[in-house]
Image: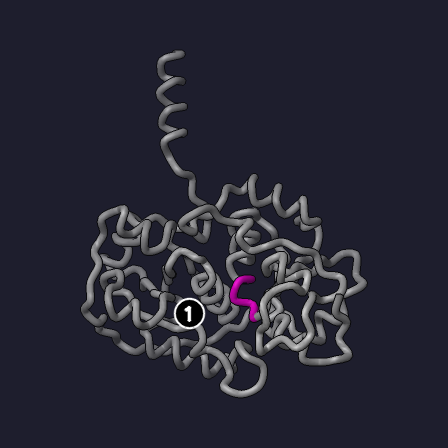
Amino acid sequence: MKKYIGIIIVLLIGTQVLFSGIITAKDAAKLSKDGKATILSARPVKDYGKKHIKDAVHIDHANLYNAEGIKSMLKSPEDIAKILGEKGITADTKVIIYDTGSNKAAGRLYWILKYMGTKDVDILDGHIKGWKKARKSITKKKTKIEAATFTPAVNKGIYADMAYVKSILKNDKVVLVDVRSKDEFDGKAKDDKNITRKGHIDGAVFFEYKNVFNEGGVLKSKDEIIAAAKTAGITADKEVVLYCASSVRAGIVFMALTDVAGFTNVKVYDGAYYEWNATKENPIK
């Protein structure tokens, strides 16, 4: 009996346990080959042109933003749906996203797709490096795309605007979370033309986005994420509202808290600090 217990322990130690929202290269490759998933590259377009995962389509998250006004705020759901449809994606498509391993672009697209009502979205474990490590196909060939119709079913429950953030600043049941770097939070970061008032939203707590993943972009364990969040005052019994400079970095924290840690009430403030600091009446610390 002890012998079998020992074998089981070794197998468990040698196996990486993945969570909802994360998929292995092996599983992603099979789903893509069988036509049951669309792989979405969130890497820079020049990188996509040099090499990308076989059959992957490409979307630059910046193309989903309004041309005018605050940088990085989303276009209308109808405009985003048109772009997704042109890439062959529908709300029923299983989408697997990867980027360089920073989790910034992949996280942003993950949250946008969830906001748009996409039913099944995963992030590739280890991103492009994880794919190469698994010895899966890389190509320079442009993927043939069959356009589709994306019908949005907007999930307003995971979206926050500036008015909403103002309304929860003194609400003890809500925690507002700044996921930027410590220097940005403290107002000591290098100049950003989109920020005229350095600092953070008064009342926000600091929790850098890098706290949720390890080197190579691999997500930390459920216990590690919950523990790190708790240290910052972020717990599942409260509503959580995330932001960074443009809410690009907020996406991966949204994914980690909801899909890995099991939090059920998490929003992203789309306008983020770029929008907040642009209104002089908004409190900054």
Q: Is residue 111 left or right of residue 56?
A: right
If the image is split into quadrants, where does the N terminus sit? top left
Q: Which secondary structure, mark 1?
A: loop
Pinpoint residue 233: horizontal percent, then vertical percent: 71, 49
Question: Which of the pair 216/260 is nearer the observer?
Answer: 216
Residue 15 lies in quadrant: top left
If the image is split into quadrants, where does the C terminus sit? bottom right
Q: Is residue 6 magenta?
A: no
Question: Which of the pair 80/210 is nearer the observer?
Answer: 210
Question: Which of the pair 198/127 is nearer the observer?
Answer: 198
Pinpoint residue 163: horizontal percent, then vertical percent: 71, 76
The residue lying at 37 percent from left, 62 percent from top is 95
Q: Is residue 121 left or right of residue 234?
A: left
The residue lying at 58 percent from left, 78 percent from top is 193
Q: Is residue 247 left or right of residue 240?
A: left
* Helix, strand or loop: magenta stretch: loop
The answer to whether residue 106 is above or below residue 216 is: below
Residue 69 lies in quadrant: bottom right
For label 1, the crowd category at 10 Å Cα-Cα, with few meaning under 14, some 14 to 19 and many 20 or more, is many
Question: Which of the pair 214/258 is nearer the observer?
Answer: 214
**Identity of the amino acid at label 1?**
Ala
Q: Is residue 231 visible?
A: yes
Residue range of the region highlighted in magenta in the rendering: 246-250
The residue lying at 44 percent from left, 72 percent from top is 61
> What residue occupies the far bottom of the structure in this picture?
68
Q: Which residue is mark 1?
A: 91
Pinpoint residue 81: horizontal percent, then vertical percent: 43, 78
Pinpoint residue 106: horizontal percent, then vertical percent: 43, 62
Q: How was the colour assigned to the protein in this rendering?
A: one colour
Q: Is residue 249 magenta?
A: yes
